Image (cartoon, helix red, strand yellow):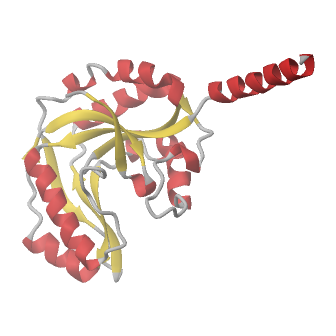
């Protein structure tokens, strides 16, 4: 009986340690665009997806967005991160954003496409502020398990795994490139979309959001929103 109690205590201790282990998640601090810009993003992506069914499909679980920051955080710090983001939207809620162009590599047969935004002072300010607010919580040791799994069970791409931990170092500040990702398609189609479908418009952000990332930088699981 004594041996049984000792074994049970040891087992419980191990289980307790396991349950207290910190889980690392990949997150995206982002802007949700206005309804008009959101609808245009869905329209362009739908046409791109028809041309290439294996590229990203934007929908309610893969929302069109403008990334401000991607990073890894401890899931245990999620309440503190949400609290830190409170009030961030006020820095941009009245500011106009500008969708300038449909960007893709015209010299290729097939290219990734995105709606490129003008790098306005207000957009740069909220980008820098996002990094400042989350810097105390950023960690670097995320893994494939940090992301929302792919529905088909395939592995998270190496490019995604490599991109997130260096976002602040390589893709921020002067290198920040605000955009809405649309997917990969034949350049001949993208030429047509750029001429006949894309509309360069001014718009406002609808909200700031915190999402758990999926593969290819998709914003999949909403963790917090300013509205």
Above or below 180: residue 69: above
Residue at 23% across / 76% down in the picture?
Answer: 50
* Quarter of image, res 184: bottom left
Residue 44 appears at what percent x and percent y? 18, 65
Viewer-proximal residue among 146 and 13: 13
Front in this rendered view, residue 79 or 90? 79
Q: Is residue 158 left or right of residue 197?
A: right
44 relative position to 181: left or right: left
Q: Is residue 11 above or below residue 167?
A: above
Query: What is the tally of numbered marks visible in this picture?
Result: 0
In this view, 62 is above or below 142? below
Q: Position of residue 167 (x, y in %)?
A: 48, 44
Residue at the right extreme?
Answer: 3
Q: Nearer the viewer, residue 3 or 129?
A: 3
Find residue 161 and report its horizontal and vertical position in percent. Answer: 55, 52
Report whether 35 appears left or right of 14: left
Q: Quadrant of residue 192?
A: bottom left
Hey, which quadrant is residue 34 in on the image? top left
Quadrant location of the N terminus?
Answer: top right
Question: Residue at point 60% right, 38% down?
Answer: 140
Residue displayed at 31% across by 76% down? 52
Residue at the image point whose x is 43% and y is 59% from the top:
151
Residue that extends furthest to the front in the rendered view of this protein? 1
Residue 137 x %, y %: 51, 25
**Quadrant where the image shows the C terminus:** top left
């Amino acid at each position: 009986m004594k041996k049984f109690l000792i074994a049970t205590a040891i087992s419980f201790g191990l289980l307790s340690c396991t349950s207290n282990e910190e889980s690392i998640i990949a997150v995206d601090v982002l802007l949700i665009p206005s309804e008009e810009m959101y609808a245009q993003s869905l329209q362009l992506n739908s046409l791109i997806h028809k041309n290439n069914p294996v590229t990203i499909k934007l929908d309610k679980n893969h929302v069109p967005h403008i990334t401000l920051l991607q990073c890894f955080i401890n899931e245990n710090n999620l309440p503190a991160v949400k609290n830190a983001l409170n009030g961030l939207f006020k820095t941009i809620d009245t500011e106009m954003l500008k969708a300038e162009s449909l960007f893709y590599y015209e010299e290729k047969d097939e290219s990734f496409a995105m709606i490129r935004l003008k790098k306005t002072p207000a957009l740069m300010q909220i980008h820098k502020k996002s990094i400042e607010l989350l810097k105390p919580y950023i960690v670097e040791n995320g893994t494939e398990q940090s992301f929302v799994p792919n529905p088909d069970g395939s592995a998270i791409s190496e490019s995604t795994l490599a991109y997130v931990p260096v976002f602040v170092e390589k893709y921020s500040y002067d290198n920040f490139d605000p955009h809405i990702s649309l997917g990969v398609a034949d350049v001949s189609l993208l030429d047509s979309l750029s001429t006949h479908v894309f509309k360069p418009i001014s718009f406002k952000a609808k909200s700031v959001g915190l999402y758990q990332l999926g593969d290819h930088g998709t914003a999949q699981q909403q963790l917090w929103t300013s509205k």
